[in-house]
């Protein structure tokens, strides 16, 4: 099913949560959602596909290069790092709309930026993650995990920077769908997680209502509710 052997399966499920969220987002794009409603979702996608493409290039020896899944994976991450930015730049224009609550923007922006920064550290120095992560990572899965976390964090950051109800709704819906799948992945893969590792609560904070990122989820919900009332 995958282009390389992924162990533990938790990493595959994390990656699957991104594809579920992305499937919803691009379905909305393909079915004609106005640009101003999807624009904020493109920068996070661009960040993710570039990180995944670089990880692939750095670890080609780990892939099953004679398999159909690898052919599909390679095609995806050859085309999208160029195609998605071009699509974004072609459609980019000033957007207007009712501003989101300032506190929601602040919390989403700060927490999103922190997640992106931590993800970039993991991507650049995967050995740090391998030595300290609460479940088994390889250099490749460390970088793919970093790309997944960067995507989720950058959605919050992008929504905060765009700052309008119109631009927030669809990206946040896709984000919430991905978080739900992420929570299912953690629940199904809990046996692979060392819950005594202090990083474990941080790892699942994006789906944990008691963590700092969980507080951001409350602001995400507030922003979505505000957008729904206005649209």
Image (spheres, helix red, strand yellow):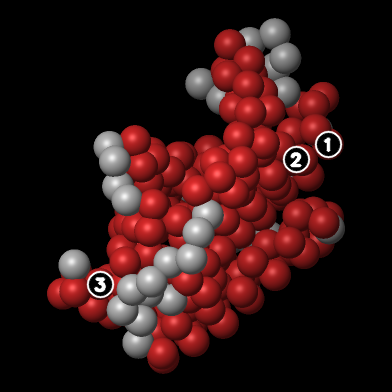
Residue 71 numbered mark, or none: none
Identify the mark nearer the N-term, 2 or 3.
Answer: 2
**Residue 201 position within the rendered picture, expressed as x and y whole percent measured from the top left:** 53, 72
State the residue position of label 2.
55
Do the residues bearing badges 2 and 1 touch, measured as CB atoms within 8 Å?
yes
Residue at image point 32% right, 51% down: 34
Tell me the SS state at disc 2. helix
State the residue position of label 1.
58
Residue 68 placement, left or right of 162: right
Residue at image point 66% right, 23% down: 74
**Residue 216 position within the rendered picture, expressed as x and y whole percent measured from the top left:** 42, 79
**Badge 3 local density, few (<14 within 10 Å), some, or many (20+)?**
many
State how far apart marks 2 and 1 are (Cα).
Answer: 5 Å
Foreground: disc 3 or disc 1: 3
**Residue 20 position within the rendered picture, expressed as x and y whole percent measured from the top left:** 39, 41
Task: Tell me if residue 164 comes above or below residue 145 in the rendering.
Answer: below
Residue 227 numbered mark, or none: 3
Residue at image point 34% right, 35% down: 30
């Amino acid at each position: 099913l995958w282009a390389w052997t992924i162990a533990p399966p938790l990493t595959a499920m994390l990656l699957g949560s991104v594809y579920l969220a992305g499937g919803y987002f691009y379905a909305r794009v393909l079915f004609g959602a106005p640009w101003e409603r999807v624009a904020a979702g493109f920068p996070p996608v661009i960040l993710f596909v570039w990180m995944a493409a670089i990880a692939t290039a750095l670890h080609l020896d780990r892939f099953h290069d004679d398999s159909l899944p690898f052919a599909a994976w390679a095609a995806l991450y050859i085309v999208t790092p160029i195609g998605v930015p071009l699509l974004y730049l072609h459609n980019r224009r000033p957007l207007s709309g009712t501003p989101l609550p300032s506190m929601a923007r602040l919390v989403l922006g700060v927490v999103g930026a922190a997640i992106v920064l931590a993800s970039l550290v993991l991507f650049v120095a995967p050995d740090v993650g391998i030595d300290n992560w609460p479940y088994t990572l390889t250099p490749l899965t460390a970088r793919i995990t970093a790309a997944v976390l960067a995507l989720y964090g950058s959605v919050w950051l992008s929504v905060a920077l765009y700052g309008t109800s119109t631009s927030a709704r669809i990206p946040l819906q896709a984000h919430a769908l991905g978080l739900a799948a992420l929570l299912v992945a953690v629940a199904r893969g809990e046996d692979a997680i060392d819950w005594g590792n202090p990083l474990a609560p941080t790892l699942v904070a994006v789906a944990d209502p008691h963590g700092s990122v969980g507080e951001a989820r409350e602001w995400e919900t507030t922003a979505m509710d505000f957008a729904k009332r206005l649209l």
